[in-house]
């Protein structure tokens, strides 16, 4: 994700895609030092990343429409090589892989498409988008560092401050990844980013860095279905984006950025026809003025002080600037938008169980087999590297060995060094220990005291990867899996040294494909019993009513993968807690297109000791909205009138806030309303000293 865009790729892709975009009017794409130029016209463009395989085709029109409503001009996506060519010469553009249909959906709604064609994409996507079969190409080098081939765009959260500018005066300033939050890995807390901070940095990038192209990464993150997530990445991707994982609008981020885009577009004539001049308004306050030959004038008033408001004079008028804020004046006179003043509503997403798998009778189970050395056919005198052995066909590789013990050894120490990501150790069929690595620190050692039999002893080690790395030097030479195994007796003498190793790629349940309808018939399922490691669970459920998003609540499970009607909804790792002691992810998205009206097959593979009886199917919805507005908030940008004067504002241009429910839902209850000086926020609020006692009754009369 952090890789800089290549100009060559960007422009070639833009020409390729926009040439056929009749609805968007794009035919010829070029650039100069000010902006991208489409059909001879300079463009101020806001772009949003929406990755087609991280959602489903039935979601694409809605996602694109909501992006357009939010003021987005361009939809950006990677092209996922390993998704389209999983084996050499065998291509797949079906379902979520159908990039042509995705681009046509963009075209149909009058937007531009921008492709990041790779071939390397990073993107928190397994192996950085490379198909693993490249690994076996002799002499392959995935990436090289070639300065003439690179252009320096900006990726990050603070490009308004950190971007050094293009490496040529003939190239425009592009912000290719404005991170709307940050990706999350198992074991780490979520990183939140406020709508105010995003808006401030965007406005600053335009004013201070001459920016004319900003891409939000991500505008909709979506879901890492199946085994597509990179190492240790959670299945949910950028859920804190303006459109959440399920495609629901996340407020206030979506609405505040919509207002920002509208305000900037009011300034576009002045911005695109000139470079700004800077005027100092104070120690930490500046004005950036765009004044074009046409007479258009726009100004960005910046208060870079994080703690204090500022009163500034600009063109003989006084303006109040909140801490760390930028006021946008499309006519160098009246404030249309301030980055710190949020007038849009806030909303709260919640989940509600609509189906419970709450009895043993609803489940069947299948115990996967722990292989022994004699049952394996792949042998080696050395410990093999995991991915070279599995060829990315499975997350799992069994390492097995057998050795003879002359006497009954009451206690012996097993020590296994691994490069991860997870290891389960079995001695004579019994689990003796598990261990795991961490993100960017995948090496670990499993140590356990074990009892050995007199005679033959079986060692079975299940090594599991949780996605392949997506970045870093020498990706083609990365090493994963078990690196050394030592067994010592109580005196420290090595019992087990070097013996032939037997290998099994994957699990028996994977080989039988018991997560599908047909494959499930090949397994000997039994009634639900006590929890055990390496167990497959199967159940049937009907699709919940309606068409809203749903998810599996897997809070009672440990680690594994889940399938609905044969389609993987991704890996889960509920037992890997954050520093706050909470699961990194509990709810796992089940797209409606995966479902039938009834008899939906749910199969869950559990590595640990999870309890499937507490799994539920939950409806996901926005259940609470809230808003706050003051006299100091600018009026909605939609009410902007260039002819208005500060002393003669149109009566309709007043600060306003709108409360809106999601489609097909109504406001059912007013929890709080106050006209006066309430304090707090949408999670914790109270009436202030000045309060109109009939506030709630008035609001209830209007909305209920």
Image (tube, rainbow, N blue to C red):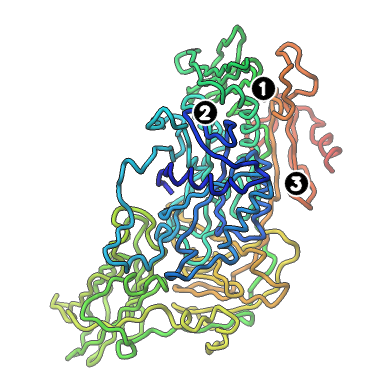
Q: Secondary structure at mark 2?
A: helix
Above/below status of 316 relative to 18: above
Dot label at residue 632: 1
Residue found at x 48% / y 74%: 606
Mark 2 crowd level (few <14, some 14–19, many ≥20, 10 Å Cα) = many
Percent x, y for residue 292?
58, 18
Give the CA distance from mark 3 to mark 2.
33 Å
- Can you give x and y, in whole percent of width and height, for residue 155 in the image? 44, 40
Q: Is 255 situated left or right of 181 in this image?
A: right
Disc with the residue nearer the chain's start (3 vs 2): 2
Q: Is residue 293 left or right of residue 624?
A: left
Nearest the viewer among 510 and 278 is 278
Q: Which residue is mark 2?
A: 206
Q: Is residue 349 visible?
A: no
| Residue 372 in the image, given as x and y percentages of width and height | 33, 87
Residue indicated by mark 3? 661
Camera-nearest residue between 211 and 633: 211
Q: Secondary structure at mark 1?
A: loop
Q: Secondary structure at mark 3?
A: loop
């Amino acid at each position: 994700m952090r890789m800089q865009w290549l100009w060559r790729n960007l422009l070639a892709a833009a020409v390729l895609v926009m040439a056929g975009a009749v609805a968007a009017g794009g035919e010829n794409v070029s650039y100069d030092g000010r902006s991208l130029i489409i059909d001879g016209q300079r463009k101020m463009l806001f772009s949003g990343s929406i990755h087609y395989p991280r959602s489903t085709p039935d979601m694409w029109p809605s996602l694109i429409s909501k992006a357009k409503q939010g003021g987005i001009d361009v939809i950006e996506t990677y092209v996922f090589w390993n998704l389209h060519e999983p084996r050499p010469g065998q291509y797949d553009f079906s379902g979520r892989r159908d990039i042509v249909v995705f681009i046509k959906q963009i075209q149909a709604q009058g937007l531009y498409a921008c492709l990041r064609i790779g071939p390397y994409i990073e993107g928190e996507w397994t192996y950085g988008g490379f198909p693993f079969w490249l690994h076996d190409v002799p002499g392959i080098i995935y990436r090289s560092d070639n300065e003439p081939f690179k252009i320096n765009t900006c990726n990050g959260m603070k490009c308004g401050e950190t971007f050094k500018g293009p490496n040529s005066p003939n190239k425009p300033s592009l912000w290719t990844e404005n991170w709307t939050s940050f990706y999350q890995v198992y074991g780490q807390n979520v990183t939140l980013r406020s709508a105010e901070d995003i808006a401030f940095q965007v406005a600053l990038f335009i004013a201070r860095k001459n920016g004319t192209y900003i891409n939000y990464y991500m505008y909709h993150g979506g879901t890492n279905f199946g085994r597509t997530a990179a190492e240790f990445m959670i299945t949910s991707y950028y859920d804190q984006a303006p459109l959440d994982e399920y495609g629901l609008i996340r407020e206030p981020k979506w609405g505040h950025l919509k207002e920002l885009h509208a305000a900037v577009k009011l300034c576009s004539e002045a911005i695109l026809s000139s470079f700004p001049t800077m005027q100092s308004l104070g120690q930490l306050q500046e004005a950036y003025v765009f004044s074009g030959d046409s007479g258009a004038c726009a100004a960005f008033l910046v208060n870079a002080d994080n703690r204090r408001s500022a009163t500034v004079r600009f063109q003989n008028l006084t303006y109040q600037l909140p801490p760390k804020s930028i006021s946008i004046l499309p006519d160098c006179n009246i404030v249309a938008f301030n980055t710190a003043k949020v007038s849009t509503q806030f909303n709260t997403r919640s989940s509600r169980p609509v189906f419970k798998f709450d009895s043993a009778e609803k489940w069947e189970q299948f115990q996967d087999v722990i292989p022994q050395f004699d049952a394996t056919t792949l042998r080696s005198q050395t410990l093999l590297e995991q991915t070279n052995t599995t060829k990315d066909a499975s997350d799992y590789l069994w390492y097995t060995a057998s050795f003879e013990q002359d006497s009954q050894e009451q206690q012996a120490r097993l020590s296994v060094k691994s490069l991860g990501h997870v290891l389960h150790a079995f001695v004579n069929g019994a689990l003796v220990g598990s261990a795991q690595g961490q993100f960017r620190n995948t090496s670990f050692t499993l140590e356990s005291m074990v009892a050995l039999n007199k005679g033959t002893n079986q060692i079975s080690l299940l090594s599991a990867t949780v996605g392949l790395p997506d970045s870093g030097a020498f990706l083609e030479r990365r090493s994963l899996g078990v690196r050394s195994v030592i067994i010592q007796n109580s005196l420290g003498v090595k019992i087990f040294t070097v013996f032939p190793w037997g290998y099994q790629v994957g699990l028996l349940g994977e080989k039988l494909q018991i997560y599908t309808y047909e494959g499930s018939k090949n397994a000997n399922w039994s009634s639900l019993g006590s929890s055990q490691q390496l167990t497959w669970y199967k159940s049937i459920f009907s699709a919940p009513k309606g068409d809203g998003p749903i998810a599996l609540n897997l809070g009672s499970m440990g680690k594994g993968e889940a399938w609905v009607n044969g389609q993987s909804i991704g890996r889960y790792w509920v037992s890997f807690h954050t520093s706050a002691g909470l699961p990194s992810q509990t709810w796992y998205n089940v797209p409606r297109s995966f479902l039938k009206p009834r008899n939906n097959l749910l199969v869950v593979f559990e590595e640990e000791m999870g309890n499937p009886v507490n799994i539920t199917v939950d409806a996901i919805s926005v259940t609470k909205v809230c808003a706050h507005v003051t006299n100091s908030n600018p009026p909605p940008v939609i009410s902007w009138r260039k002819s208005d004067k500060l002393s003669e504002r149109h009566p309709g241009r007043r600060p306003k806030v709108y409360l809106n429910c999601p489609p097909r839902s109504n406001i059912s209850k007013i929890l709080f309303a106050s006209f006066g000086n309430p304090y707090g926020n949408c999670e914790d609020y109270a009436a202030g000293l000045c309060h109109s006692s009939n506030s709630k009754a008035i609001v209830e009369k209007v909305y209920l």
